[in-house]
Image (tube, helix red, strand yellow):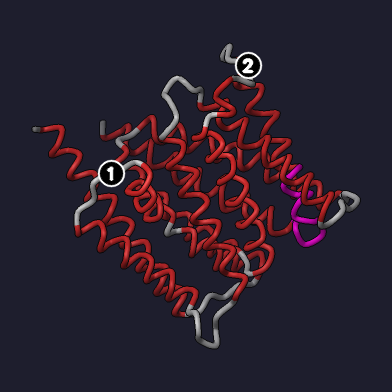
Amino acid sequence: MANNNLRGIALLITAMAFFAATDACVQLATQTLPKGQVLSLMGGGGALIFAALTRSKGHRLIAADLVSWPMLLRNSAEIVATFSFVTALSTVGISLASSVIQATPLAVTFFAIILLKEQVGWRRWGAILIGFAGVLIILRPGLSGFEPNALWAVAAMLGLALRDVSTRLMPGTTPSTRIAFYGMAVLTLGGWVHMLLIEPPQPLTVASSSYVLGTVVLGSLGYFAMIQAMRTGEISVVAPFRYIRIIFALIVGAIVFGERPDLLTYLGCGITIAAGIYAFWREARLSKKGNAS
């Protein structure tokens, strides 16, 4: 089990590195291409990959679950989350956007209370409130350092949490690859609508094509590595290492984009991560007690 946990941790750290690199490619791509075009190309590439995986497992691409309310909720949240995060990356940068995103696990717990009727004690409620206070420190609303575009990262964080919780509402018989295919397909559709109504597409260059290709390849590798990580080690041991993504994001932001977050950003990020780790540890502990009884 110890070796499995080490492999799971290594896989998750690798996945977080891939995701940070994907975010960098998105930020570079949106410097010359409209957001809708980037979304449509990302979604189209991902849809092709997951369509092939779905068919290779003998599953249908389109089924009745497409119009079930959990799937509709998930796909809507997918569009909101991805569009908002791409907008945040293109306006405030990878360091600030990724710092806010660290509150996603806490938001998942919050939505699970509302939608899944999960019972949460005062300790985890406290962790949620403290974690969101950390987000406020990062955003600093009302102060001179407040950046309104950072609210796109908040919208992305809430969208990601709602997407994850709505996934839990789906029956276990729905293939994961089909769920991923639907998500990528709606991103493609959303990107087309954005290009049609708001900002027309621009010609691709060698550089912009490379960045878009990087988002598809690196994002798919990260997705695969994350799934393997969760299936290899104990979730209670492996999952907290997802927070290492912020370290990769800060490194990429500093080296590639010259970003230098201030002390308040580091402080807020640290508070949010600490609250998230505590909430996860508390949930794992209560789960073990329940299983023991």
Of helix, strand and loop, which one carries label 1?
loop
Observer-nearest of 237 and 153: 153
Residue at screen point 39% across, 74% down: 267
Relative to 203, residue 260 above or below:
below
Name the residue nearer the viewer: 117 or 127. Answer: 117
Which residue shows up at 32% across the image and 32% down it?
A: 4
Q: Quadrant of residue 50?
A: top right
Q: Tag 1: residue type?
A: Glu
Position of residue 191 in the picture relative to residue 141 (left or right): right
In the displayed structure, 201 sits above or below 6; it is below
Above or below: residue 229 compared with residue 57:
below
Q: Is residue 153 magenta?
A: no
Q: Which residue is mark 2?
A: 55
The quadrant where residue 32 appears: bottom right
- The spot of residue 177 in percent (x, y) is 56, 26
**Residue lying furthest bottom in this view?**
144
The residue to which callout 1 is attached is: 118
